[in-house]
Image (tube, grey):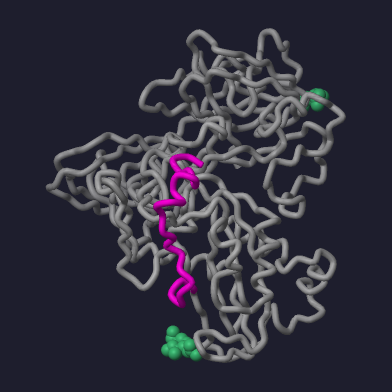
Amino acid sequence: MGHLTSALLRGLSLLLVTRSVFAMVLFNATDLGILLEKYLDDDDGDWVVERQRSKRAITASDMQAILDLHNKLRGQVYPPASNMEYMVWDTELEQSAQEWAETCLWEHGPAGLLPQIGQNLGVHWGRYRPPTSHVQAWYDEVKDYSFPYPQECNPHCPFRCSGPVCTHYTQLVWATSSRIGCAINVCYNMNVWGQIWAKAVYLACNYSPKGNWWGYAPYKHGTPCSACPPSYGGMCKENLCYKGDGTNRQNPHEETDERNSIEPEAPHSPGPRLQSPSPTRRPNAVVSKEQMSQIVTCDTKLRDQCKGTTCNRYECPAGCLDSMAKVIGTVYYDMQSSICLAGIHYGVIDNDGGWMDVTRQGRKDFFIKSYKNGLQSLGKYQSANAFTVSKVTVKVITCETTVSALCPYQKPARHCPRIYCPRNCLQENPHLSRVIGTKMYSDKSSICRSAIHAGVLRNESGGYVDVMPTDNRKLYISSYQNGIVSESLQNPAGGKAFRVFAVI
Ligand SMILES: *[C@@H]1O[C@H](CO)[C@@H](O)[C@H](O)[C@H]1NC(C)=O
Ligand SMILES: *[C@@H]1O[C@H](CO)[C@@H](O)[C@H](O)[C@H]1NC(C)=O
């Protein structure tokens, strides 16, 4: 629970989640009139069938969309969060949300549960809206919310909200609220603030551990994943403290049992309906599509994107020359600049988009304007944080090449070239091409064989992988995955670690 212990807080805390009308979000249909919508009139559609079979008031796709959007938004908060936890679906929370949604009462509840859970509610009528539109509306309260920095939090953090309500936002981005369960119910003649809505679609989301503790910031500001609770074992996914997908990280020892074809069920991990294992999945077959590059739009400013080491490589779309975004500086670019436009201006990518690396350069006193590669950059005579851009180089290596030989870790961070691995590294002599660890590997490991083990590279084809060198680990865990038994290693003297990522 990080810095929060509910026992400590219970005595002195006041909950910001109120049961007042302001803590809920409404939608209505002024634009298209009252059209029949998915949840109301699609009586023989998928949703109803699904519901009868599973007794669930939410479809698998809505569940996934709500969860994915939460994680996406949580991973992109500004200022960046150092302890934001990855959220997983919890069927118990879903069940309690369903029971509440079925009451059709437009208020928080049930009262007996509210001390233990956080809750966001939304209701709308008329034209179909995906449930994620409510989630987005909750998040959009951020425009009225001022994040309390540590220096303002003595003895308590202020809660500054310039709009009617910000608590949906703060619950959504509460770092320690790592579990969610939601339900959707159609309510007839629902009383919403004194108006009777003939057919209302009611969304209830319950969160645990609950957020919105009075006097606390929703999360800690800092480099993403730099302040994760120890139970996460230092793992990070898209700026979120992450426990792995349940195939190997939760319980590495079970993985060594070859007959273990059932994934160990992580506590509160999403049910099987949420996971989409590939049809060819075999025991110990791990496939990771996690990428190191951040996929950004032409308008994304470096300032708005995360600041950790996972955030040094970016994938830009084509056509950024048409963007109205700004680029400030020459060679050294202001953090307020569009990442992709800085890449075009400097010449590391062109209007077809592509990959580029970014290096943060600390403060610069001024930024020079210039016209390069079809782009006019702006000047600025004011000190600001700066970055430089560089090309993503590609290096062809052998099955034996290690990170310690290719690109040893250096503080604060270093860009490794993108790697091209040959085929058939599975066949290599395991004594010459060792694999030490699981997900996080010792830098004495073969890069390509670690990539096969991690599921980001196929033995049959070889191909590209991205490598991220990181600081030393105390423990590397052995496991059997994708035809490779990796070694364990404890308290190594010297040496660093690395992670491998898919390039898709
Ligand atoms: C619906 O929304 C519009 C604009 O947001 C508002 O003017 C109108 O009063 C709302 N109607 C109801 C029934 O809430
Ligand atoms: C690994 O790939 C090579 C080359 O494509 C292939 O000949 C070999 O059979 C593969 N090994 C395994 C165990 O799949």
Residue range (magenta): 1-24
Q: Residue at x 66, y 16 (%)?
A: 488
**Residue 356 in view (yes/no):** no
- Quadrant occupied by the C terminus: top right
207 shown above or below 109 = above
Image x and y of residue 205, in percent: 59, 64
The kind of secondary structure the magenta stretch mainly shows is loop
Q: Nearer the viewer, residue 35 or 119?
A: 119
Which residue is situated farthest in the left direction here? 381
Which residue is situated farthest in the front direction here? 11
Check residue 185 for magenta coloring: no
Image x and y of residue 355, in percent: 47, 42
187 shown above or below 14 = below
443 shown above or below 247 = above
208 shown above or below 400 = below
Check residue 23 for magenta coloring: yes
Image x and y of residue 262, in percent: 82, 38
Q: Residue at x 20, y 44 (%)?
A: 384
Tell me where residue 490 sits by quadrant: top right
